[in-house]
Amino acid sequence: MKKLSWIIGLGILIVWGCDPKDDPTPTIPGQEVKQAIFDSMKEWYFWNQELPATVNLANFDSNEALLDGIIFKPLDRFSYLTTQEAFTNAFVGRNAGHGFGFAFTSDEKLFISFVFDESPAGKDGWKRGWEIIQINGKPIAEYKTSSGGYDFKLGPPDPGISNSFTFKLPDGTTTTRTNIKAEYQSNSVLEQKVFDAGGKKVGYWAYQSFKATAGLNPTRSAEVTSSMEFFQSQGIQDLIIDLRYNGGGSVAVAEQISNYLIQSSNSGKLMYTNKLNATKSSQNNSKNFSKIGTLALSRVIFITSRGSASASELVINNLDPYMEVVLIGDNTFGKPVGSFPLSQFNRLLKDNNVEVVPITFATANSEGKAEYFDGFPANFNVGDSPQFEWGDPQDLRLAAALQFVQNGNVSGRMMDTYFKPKWEMIDAFKGLQQEFPSY
């Protein structure tokens, strides 16, 4: 069996130890790339038995239209096309744009939900908890679409694009900032701190996307190492991990985190397995835990939402058979399947800088749990409150998590704050950008 090394985004990427093979000779002049996409899908797509036996490539006016026309839509919300450079950059946090996210409150006010430190927005001092009241001189309500979503018309994530934002700050004052998109290195850790709750030391870790640190071998995150060493030094007894806006990332980093969290007594036991399509079943694989560090946790409390996807769900699913896992907030996104890029197997795709990233396998935990397309249900549904900064105990979901640590339950009054957002940031993006959503 070939040695596999894994990465996960909203899906999972496998870097296979083999050379790309030449693709079949295209039979339709002028449609070579589309033919290569279709041939690659027939070989690797997880639901390849659901693909049409043949397609008239001339009926599709773009590569994207072809992919959309052949995927197994009852379950596939995830397959996409991109470029090789964009794919590689995303998994190590090389971004371009303003560098922020947003979230709505129950009364549909729009707030900054997170800001990357080195992004244009971060360098301009933007913070979670700032209310966005105008974009390019127009009130937020004017950007609402007929479907109930929003199109803020901020343009593509290309350096040099400028947009103006008017904010209402927590002290009641307003400020208007013009911000120019640029390339930047994004961070994953948004906050780390320790609370004293009921006589216990409780770690709080706000983590936004599983990004690897470029140049490290084996693949891992230096940020994760630093955070876990901090929590170890503080002697925490409980840990709250905030994944509410975390759409995925590197499976190697998901494994790294899982190995910090697992108990020493479960080191060496099965973490997860993967299953490819029937023609590739010889390349199915599994991964075992290998304990890192000295954290000794009997449970982990996760703050989640529908924006918590893929690698976030993988960590939750990995740990569930071995410790108490508590979810507070909202149900997760629902992505038990993964992807790896196909240009490495197809010379024509590689030479044309077309990266096909379809669903190619499913994952299961040690108990075989694999079918969670509706997401993992929250144990306690609590509303989001992006008007509060990271780590502020007034934040409803954090307050509920701290309450659970102290009482083993969440009050009905706290759960009465729950609301289902009509539209969330993850809805604003497709493909690779949906894996790492930010503006």
Image (cartoon, rainbow, N blue to C red):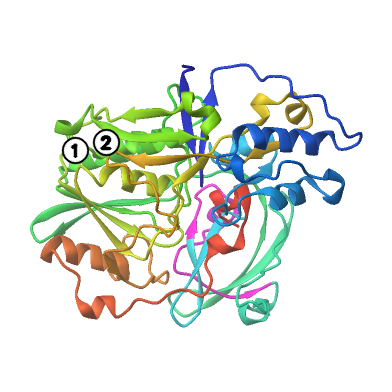
Residue 415 in the image, given as x and y percentages of width and height: 27, 76
For residue 138, what is the image quadrant?
bottom right
At x 68%, y 30%, the residue is: 343
| Amino acid type indicated by mark 2 | Tyr
At x 47%, y 30%, the residue is: 6
| Amino acid type indicated by mark 1 | Leu
For residue 233, what is the image quadrant?
top left
Residue stretch rendered in magenta on the structure: 114-135
At x 76%, y 33%, the residue is: 36
Q: Secondary structure at mark 2?
A: helix
Comparing 18 with 153, the one in front is 18
Tell me, yes or no, whether the highlighted magenta stretch contains residue 85.
no
Relative height, residue 365 to residue 415 (above, below) = above
Marks 1 and 2 sit apart, C-alpha to C-alpha, by 7 Å
Comparing 173 with 361, the one in front is 361
Which quadrant, please, contains the C terminus? bottom right
* Circle 1 residue: 295
Q: Is residue 161 shown to the viewer in this render?
A: yes
In the picture, the disc for residue 335 is none
Relative height, residue 204 to residue 30 (above, below) = below
Q: Is residue 200 left or right of residue 1?
A: left
Q: Is residue 43 left or right of residue 327?
A: right
Residue 167 in the image, given as x and y percentages of width and height: 55, 73
Contact (Cβ within 8 Å) of mark 1 with mark 2: yes
Relative height, residue 243 to residue 165 (above, below) = above
* Circle 2 residue: 260
Within 10 Å of disc 2 (Cα), the crowding (few <14, some 14-19, many 20+) is many
Q: Is residue 276 left or right of residue 392?
A: right
Q: Is residue 85 shown to the viewer in this render?
A: no
Q: Is residue 304 left or right of residue 102?
A: left
Tell me, yes or no, whether the highlighted magenta stretch contains residue 122.
yes
